[in-house]
Image (cartoon, grey):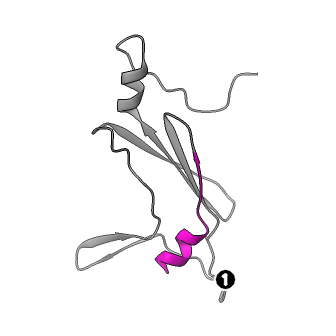
Amino acid sequence: MKKWINSVRKVQSTMLCTSYFWKVSRCELCRSTLITEFIHDDVSFYLLKFELPVSGNDFLVLEQISADDHKMLHVLDIDRRDANSQNSSTTFQVGSAPS
């Protein structure tokens, strides 16, 4: 199941953020809602595969909540932001761009 779910994954990357998109909220055979994580013998298992930054320790994972049948995660690489910043403060703006 994990292999099938991740076969429909789409990835978009920028220098500071990688976004992962899955449209797999329902089983293609029985149309039941799919789970994305479960616990067995006190061990958590996650069916959605996504990469964490290898540049350092600081990152942030945001899940986009939607009424549609999809999951979206955004992985922000905070260490990379610090390395490319002209000053010492780290600022991320989240949300729609002002119009």
Q: Is residue 69 above or below residue 61?
A: below
Q: Is residue 94 above or below residue 67?
A: above
Using residue 81 as the reference point, say whether residue 58 is left or right of it.
left
Using residue 91 as the reference point, say whether residue 23 is left or right of it.
right
**Residue 8 is inside the magenta segment:** yes
Q: Which residues are magenta?
A: 1-12
The residue drawn where x is 54% and y is 26% is 93
Residue found farthest to the top: 87
In the rendering, at what x and y percent does residue 77 appear? 41, 37
**Residue 92 is inside the magenta segment:** no
In the rendering, at what x and y percent does residue 27 appear? 62, 81
Q: Quadrant of the C terminus?
A: top right
The residue drawn where x is 42% and y is 26% is 81
Q: Is residue 70 above or below residue 57?
A: below
In the rendering, at what x and y percent does residue 33 appear? 59, 77
Task: Provide the residue designation for mark 1.
Answer: 28
Using residue 48 as the reference point, say whether residue 67 is left or right of it.
right
The residue drawn where x is 39% and y is 10% is 87
- Badge 1 element: loop
Residue 53 is drawn in which quadrant?
A: top left
Residue 29 is drawn in which quadrant?
A: bottom right
Q: Residues within 10 Å of mark 1 (few under 14, many from 20)?
A: few
The residue drawn where x is 67% and y is 83% is 28
Between 67 and 92, the one lying in front of the other is 92
Residue found farthest to the left: 42
How many numbered circles are shown?
1
Amino acid type at circle 1 is: Glu
Residue found farthest to the right: 99
